[in-house]
Image (spheres, grey):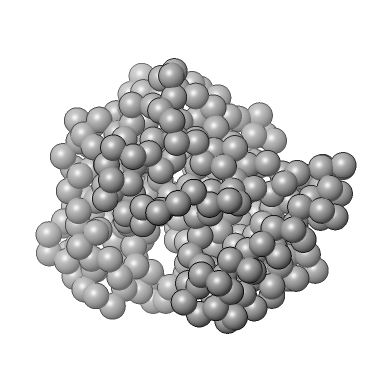
């Protein structure tokens, strides 16, 4: 049985990268039947370029930057395909990527999400992500960087680029905009899917290339993959780490995290920001504010279904 596939992307002031990603998707051996770009009020001519060069792409042009999770929800809710390939705008995919993700979805009916193996764009033989282990006791995320031996393997969650089963959204909702507007929004969604009985996978032969800096050394803490030069990102990194544990860690695991590992990792990251960040104390202070807010702010319940019983966008999204 064939399932309609939708490609959706969130864009923000990366006109040339948006073009490159769309071209790579259109050059694949399975081209999605539907293509959607959600633009977060770009000022670099992205929307005009899309109208001129990709007239068959549906563009949702936001009047302001709604950040990651809200815009991802917009794209997935607008999709009409059962399988939705969602991507950030700083990627390109190889010819077989969409086909491999699609085939993995078909062969694993319990999949909520299937991600490709993600390589560094500037070091295309080096793996950035081949699955991850997110430990709720330590709060640390470890990206696996060895190619899986099996064709499809389980993972805790996936960042940046993944195919989701749209019908899952009718049961668990979309990404939690209120709690995780930035950082760990995909992890929270993946945990909620797992708690509902679904699984998350990586498809070994699906290849994506991510425009992220190639690290010069291995971070001593987790994946180390957040911008220490951006106070806003530092704030949400710290806040979301605490909120994820508050929602999904249980019993002794949660107690150990907040009593031991969270204070230790906050101190470590604050010192890293103070020493290595271009904004030094400003970034460190933002991280501390995020850590405090993550522990003290009210934790709201997960969002309602993103789609109604007929598969149409819920009123809050449409």
* Camera sees residue 82: no
Q: Nearer the viewer, residue 295 or 304?
A: 295
Position of 274 with respect to 55 (left or right) is right
For residue 65, what is the image quadrant? bottom left
Q: Nearer the viewer, residue 62 or 193?
A: 193
Number of marks in the rendered image: 0
Q: Nearer the viewer, residue 302 or 87?
A: 87
- The x and y percentages for residue 144 are 50, 36
Position of 310 with respect to 118 (left or right) is right
Residue at 51% x, 60% y: name it.
Answer: 226
Residue at 54% x, 62% y: name it.
Answer: 182
Position of 32 with respect to 165 (left or right) is left
For residue 71, what is the image quadrant? bottom left
Residue at 57% x, 42% y: name it.
Answer: 142
Residue sitting farthest toward the left:
53
* Camera sees residue 72: yes
- The x and y percentages for residue 128 are 41, 43
Position of 300 with respect to 236 (left or right) is right
Q: Quadrant of the N terminus?
A: top left
Residue at 71% x, 65% y: name it.
Answer: 267
- The x and y percentages for residue 307 are 54, 47
- The x and y percentages for residue 261 are 76, 52
């Amino acid at each position: 049985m064939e399932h309609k596939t939708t490609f959706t992307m969130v864009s923000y002031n990366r006109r040339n990268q948006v073009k490159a990603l769309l071209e790579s998707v259109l050059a694949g051996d399975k081209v999605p039947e539907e293509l959607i770009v959600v633009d977060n009020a770009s000022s670099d001519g992205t929307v005009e370029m899309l109208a001129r060069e990709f007239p068959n792409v549906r563009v949702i042009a936001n009047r302001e930057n709604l950040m990651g999770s809200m815009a991802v929800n917009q794209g997935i809710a607008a999709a009409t395909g059962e399988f939705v390939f969602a991507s950030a705008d700083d990627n390109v995919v190889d010819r077989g990527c969409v086909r491999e993700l699609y085939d993995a979805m078909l062969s694993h009916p319990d999949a909520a999400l299937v991600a490709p193996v993600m390589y560094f764009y500037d070091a295309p033989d080096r793996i950035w992500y081949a699955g991850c282990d997110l430990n709720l006791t330590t709060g640390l995320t470890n990206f696996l960087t060895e190619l899986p031996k099996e064709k499809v393997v389980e993972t805790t969650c996936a960042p940046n680029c993944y195919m989701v089963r749209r019908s899952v959204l009718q049961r668990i909702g979309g990404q939690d905009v209120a709690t995780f507007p930035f950082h760990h929004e995909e992890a929270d969604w993946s945990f909620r899917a797992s708690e509902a009985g679904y699984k998350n996978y990586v498809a070994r032969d699906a290849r994506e290339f991510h425009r992220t800096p190639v690290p010069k050394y291995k971070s001593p803490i987790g994946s180390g993959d957040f911008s220490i030069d951006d106070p806003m990102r530092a704030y949400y990194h710290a806040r979301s780490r605490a909120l994820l544990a508050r929602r999904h860690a249980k019993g002794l695991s949660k107690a150990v995290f907040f009593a031991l590992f969270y204070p230790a990792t906050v101190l470590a990251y604050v010192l890293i920001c103070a020493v290595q960040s271009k904004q030094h104390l400003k970034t460190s202070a933002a991280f501390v504010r995020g850590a405090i807010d993550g522990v003290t702010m009210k934790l709201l319940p997960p969002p309602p279904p993103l789609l109604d019983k007929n598969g149409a966008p819920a009123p809050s999204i449409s």
